[in-house]
Amino acid sequence: KFCAMYANLCSRIAIAFKFEQVAEDGTKYPITFRSVILNKCQGLFSDRKAVKPVPADLADLEQRQEWELRENKLRQHLLGLVKFVAELANQSVLSMNIVPQILDTLWAAQLGYEDLELFTIVLSTSGKQLPSAKLFVQKCRDWIKEFTEREVQDSEGIRIRYLMQNVADLADTNWVHRQASSAAQGPKTIGEIREDIAKREKMLENELKNMK
């Protein structure tokens, strides 16, 4: 919810303050805030890890809850990170040229569906300002078509299909988010987004039942 606000703050810091780094020999040399935050975000993104499901043989209820809490925090961290980076690009703190690189990396799906979810967040956040957005939206449409034609559709894939469809729908409306006209409501939180996803998952479950 606050990614855009923090990105705006970073934009102001980049303009208003000068930074310097001290070498081992004591020499000071100037560095830009953009390079500092880019290196930090790049390191976090490169080190991202897949969320691990609770082991089937972990019987203790408290340990299972702790595991789920830890992995959920990791998931929220990843979602927040990529959205923040996209907002930094929107604010020109980072170059918009970095966004296609991130999208290509996520589309390779090194972490499976999790990377595809991150892909949809980055594209929905920066799509309006991204010159090559149409190419990535087409990837979403192609993925939806390919997934829909599968004989077996797993629940996680169904969830990603809805996220991809949301991106395609957003592109069709010139990247105008729902409720964007109501400034008082503000942007949706990650929790609110996930609630919407849960509702769509339920609709899909009913859809699949009807297909059987």
Image (cartoon, rainbow, N blue to C red):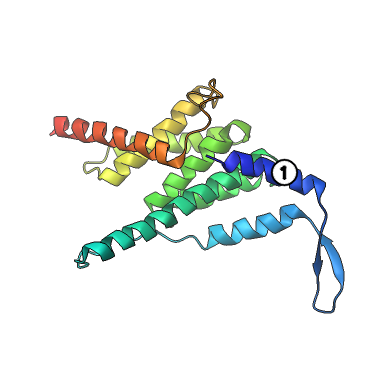
189 above or below 32? above
Residue on which the image places disc 1? 11
Name which residue type carries label 1. Ser
Q: Please provide percent x and percent y for residue 118.
A: 47, 47
For this orientation, the residue located farthest to the bottom is 25
Mark 1 Cα-neighbour bin, 10 Å: few <14, some 14–19, many ≥20: some
Q: Quadrant of the C terminus?
A: top left
Q: Is residue 202 left or right of residue 197?
A: left
69 above or below 123? below
Q: Please provide percent x and percent y for residue 102.
A: 56, 49
Dividing the picture into quarters, in which one does residue 65 lie? bottom left
Dividing the picture into quarters, in which one does residue 153 lie? top left
Q: Residue at x 60, y 47 (%)?
A: 85
Who is closer to the viewer here, 197 or 114? 197
Q: Is residue 147 left or right of residue 22?
A: left
211 above or below 23? above
SS at badge 1: helix
Q: Please provide percent x and percent y for residue 53.
A: 30, 59
For this orientation, the residue located farthest to the left is 212
Who is closer to the viewer here, 191 or 107? 191
